[in-house]
Every structure is written in structure tokens, then in C-alpha cells.
Amino acid sequence: MKLLQRLFLLFLFICVTTVALAQTSAELRRNKEAIQREIDLLQRNLNETSSTKRLTMGQIRAINSKIRLMQNKISIINSEVKNLDNQIHENTNEVHSLKSQLGQLKNEYAGMVRFAQRNRNAYEKMMFIFASDNFNQAYKRIKYFQQFGQYRKKQADYIQGTQKKIEYKIVVLDKNLKEKSNLLTEQQQEKVKLGKNKTEQAQMLNQISRQEKQFRQDIAARKRKQAEIDRAIRSAIQREIELARKKAEEEERLAAQKAIAEGRPVPVAKEKTNSSYLTASPESAKLSAGFENNRGRLPWPVGQYSIVERFGNHTEGQANYTNDGINILTEQGAAVKAVFEGEVLFVRELYGTYIVALRHGDYFTIYQNLKTVSVAKGNKVETKQTLGVVASKEDGPVLHFEIMRGQTKLNPEAWIAK
């Protein structure tokens, strides 16, 4: 019976381990497929923008992003191979263990067969029962013969079941080995592609050095344009803060007048911050709380996406600049959607494209580089509602996306879903 218990525990362990590994492998495959979609998107954009005679910053950022994604994909393939190696090792050990258990079961069964052969006729069984010292012993010997027969049948079933388990694990093991072979082939192909892209990157960097002056001028022009856009955004937010402040002060003044008229003490006004002004109304407070509770879970503002420039400081050649949001490459004519419900703070056209800013309590989301817009100032919008269509310039269809709390810039990657 101890042997049977060990077999059951071994089988249970096999099932649990197989499910856990399968879940991990499925997650790795999903991540790999998502990365490949980004790589394909970047490659399509590079194919479209490479027709221009002059190398652009967008092309450089796209090839850099593509190389980073390809390295991530190779890393995932390495993890998949490691997972399969673990599965192969465990399945091999399980086959050896099951074969050992099968040998023990067969030995036990052979012993029972030999015993049955020695007591095969009814006369010998009857003599064994009649040789009992008393009635109780005779009864026990009868029960023994009955249980022995049942146990022998069970042993035969366990032997057959163990053989089937071994056959199944050998099939799984063979499948694992084929999967590993396919993954190693895929890994080698990706390394070859990565090498070609690094060569292309080196050629671009060499071209940058020859166009250094032009790139510095392009970055300086970008800084001037972005500074003007930032001033417009900050001015609009500051006006919202001032309106909220005046409204709060007026409410406090009316409350004080009412208290004096009723002979009650005048309420002491609490010191307020910009955030407290912006969340003074129950509706604004609810929006702020909802936005904050969805940190890391906000939907992407476009359907297909690849981040080609991240939040923070950047260096291109000898030029330095700061990106207060993220630049998202998407598809031509992609719809730009609100990442959370709120109100349109403003819609403005600057340098031939539109900017849309939404207010979510004391949080703001900004969507730059729209070709057309479908909302207007003061409109209420829902999560995933279309705001407009992304514009496509020399760098391709790139959306610049920002998140702010009051006047503070936040890293959008910390807020949108992974």
C-alpha cells in the first residue's frame, strides 16, 4: 500500500508541475508574440520612411527600439529553452522513476502469481481453511483468499496504468525535444537578424556624425516648438487652477457671511494646494481617485504601439534634450483614444497638427500630433473614446503622450498597462 501511495503522490506532482510549466510557457509565448508585433510595426515604419533622402531622428529611434525589442525576444527564447530543459529533465526523471516503480509492481505481482500457483486448486484451499485452529481463524483465511484475489487484480490494473503513464511521458518528452530544436533554430535566426540590424544601426550612427550640425539644428527647433506647446499646456492648467481657486474662495466667503448672519463662529479656512483646488468638487475628487486607482492599468491611447522615445533625458550626438512624455509609433490613420474619462480642457492647433488635453480631476492627459480631432473644449469624454486621428510626418505616425498631475510631469509608462 505504501508503494501505491508513492505512485499516487508522484502522479499528482507530475500533474501540478506540468500545469505550472505550461502556464509559464504560455505567458512567454504571449510576450514573444507581442514583441514581434512591435518589431513588425517598427519595420513597416522604417520601410516607409527610408525612402526619404535625409536620415531622420525618427529612423534612428526606430532602429534603436527595434534592436532593443529583438534583444528582448532572444532573451524570451532563452527563457523558453530553459523552461523546456527543466521539463525535459523532470520528464526524464519521471520516466526513470515510473520504470523503477513498474519493476517493483511486477516483482510483487510475480510473487502473488507464484503463491496462486501453489494454491491453485480448490482442494488445497479447502485444506488450508480446514487446518485452522478455530472458527475465527478459518473465517480470516477465507477473507484472506478473497482480498488476495482483489488485490492481485488491483496490482494488474496499477501495472497497466503505470505502463500507460510511461508511454505518455515518453510522448511528451519527444515533443519537448522537438520544441527545443525548433526554439534553437528560431534563436539562431533572430541572432542573424539582430546582427544585420546592428550593422544598419552602425551605418546610421556613422551618417549621424556627418550630419551632426543638421541634427543639432533639428533638436533645437524641436525644443523651441515643444517649449511653446508646454507653455500653452501649463497656461491652460494654471487657468483651471485659478478658476478652481476663485470658486473655492467665493464659497468660503459665502459660508463666512452665512455664519455671521446666523451668529455662528466663522469657519477657519484651511490652507489649500493646487491639487486640493482641482479636486474641491465631489465629481473632480472621484475622477482623481479613479485615475490614481488605475495606475499601471490605463489603456493605451492607440491600438498598435511601440515606444520609440521614452520619458526623461536623452542624448543624440552632442545634443541633449528632455522628453516630458513618451513618443508612441503607431499605424497610419490610427485612432487616438482617451485613456480615462474626463473633460476636454482644450483643443489647439500648433505647427500644422492638433493637441488635445483632457482633465481628470487634478490629473491631465495630453495627446500631441493629431491630424484631425473629433472633440471640442468642454466636452465630456469616456474611457477609450476617440479624440482624433494621429498625424504622420517624416518620422511616421507618432503620437506624443503626456500625463501630468497639476503642473508636474509624470512618466506615462508607470500608468499605462504593461
Image (cartoon, grey):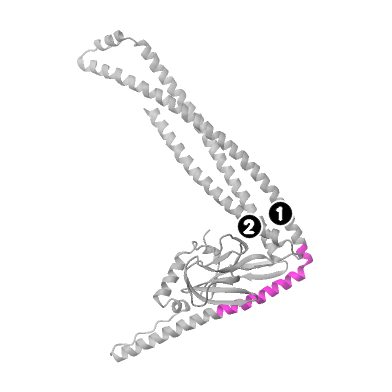
Give how far across and how far down residue 134 sits, in percent: 20, 14
Reading the chain from its start, which is encountered first: label 2 or label 1? 2
Q: Label 1, on which residue?
A: 197
Q: Main secondary structure of the magenta part?
A: helix
Is residue 164 found left or right of 313 in the rendered image? left
Is residue 257 rendered to the left or right of residue 102? left
Q: Give the spatial CA distance, label 2 vs label 1.
A: 15 Å
- At 72% from the left and 54% from the top, the residue drawn is 198
Q: Percent from the top left, x then y, of residue 181?
A: 62, 38
Asked which quadrant contains residue 310, the reply is: bottom right
Q: Which residues are magenta?
A: 207-234
Q: Position of residue 7 (x, y in %)?
A: 42, 31
Task: Say if the magenta span includes residue 291.
Answer: no
Which residue is at 57% across, 39% downward?
Answer: 85
Residue underneath mark 2? 41
Confirm whether the magenta stretch covers residue 224: yes
Label 1 secondary element: helix
Q: Does 244 appear above or below 214?
A: below
Three-letter amino acid code at disc 1?
Asn
Which image quarter is the N terminus in? top left
Which residue is nearer to you in this view: 390 or 278?
390
Identity, as a three-letter code, of the amino acid under mark 2: Leu
**Identity of the residue furthest to the left in this view:** 135
Q: Is residue 343 visible?
A: yes
